[in-house]
Amino acid sequence: MLLEKIISISGKPGLYKLVSQLKNGFIIEEVTTKKKVSIGNSSQVSLLDNIAMFTFDKEVPLFEVFENIAKNNDYKETISHKSSEAELTEFMVASLPNYDTDRVYNSDIKKLAQWYNILHKAGYITPESFVKAEPETVEGEAAEEVNVEKEAPKKAPKAEKPATPKVKASTGAKAATKSTHRKMG
């Protein structure tokens, strides 16, 4: 699932896809209706790709939690975010059994269910969405591994850094870049 361009905007319901960056904001597209609008740099934006949920051991990326929900529901919609507190707790235990009950609030669980259902409706939740790219294998890889033990490892040649042309950015572009990193980072 490609979450790197899916965002949540504070104060706006739903989820949006980043389409492009403007000098003083962004063009976004609502994921279910595909309606495009622009927002300013002052909007508080959260990338779903940067969100994780607390467990007692670690933080689990939202991608993995969505994958658990999808598998538990046979890639269909899950419970409504308007379900009872007991149903939401049961949903969370099934989705992330070791979640930190002190740091994951009921409002977080509601948002998780709501976001999952929005992404499902928009076609982002399919079995193919969660397939991780496997590293490419080369024929005869096992034979190469044996040879590696016998030979001393060779240093890879240092890659040359491509020359970057120096272009002076306008004040507006600098401001847009700085606020983008601050809001989304």
Image (spheres, rainbow, N blue to C red):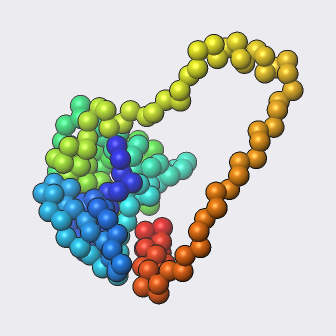
Image check: 77 left or right of 49? left
Name above or below for residue 99 compared with residue 150: below
Residue under the image location 20 percent in, 56 percent down: 31
Residue 135 lies, in percent from the top left, at 53, 30
Residue under the image location 32 percent in, 38 percent down: 129
Q: Quadrant of the N terminus?
A: top left
Rendering quarter of residue 6: bottom left
Image check: 149 left or right of 44? right
Residue 29 lies, in percent from the top left, at 22, 62
Name above or below for residue 58 compared with residue 140: below
Rendering quarter of residue 132: top left
- Residue 140, visible in the rendered structure: yes
Residue 131 lies, in percent from the top left, at 38, 33
Residue 47 lies, in percent from the top left, at 38, 61
**Could you say which is closer to the camera, residue 13 or residue 163?**
163
**Could you say which is closer to the camera, residue 120 or residue 153?**
153
Name above or below for residue 155 compared with residue 25: above
Residue under the image location 26 percent in, 41 percent down: 125
Residue under the image location 42 percent in, 85 percent down: 172
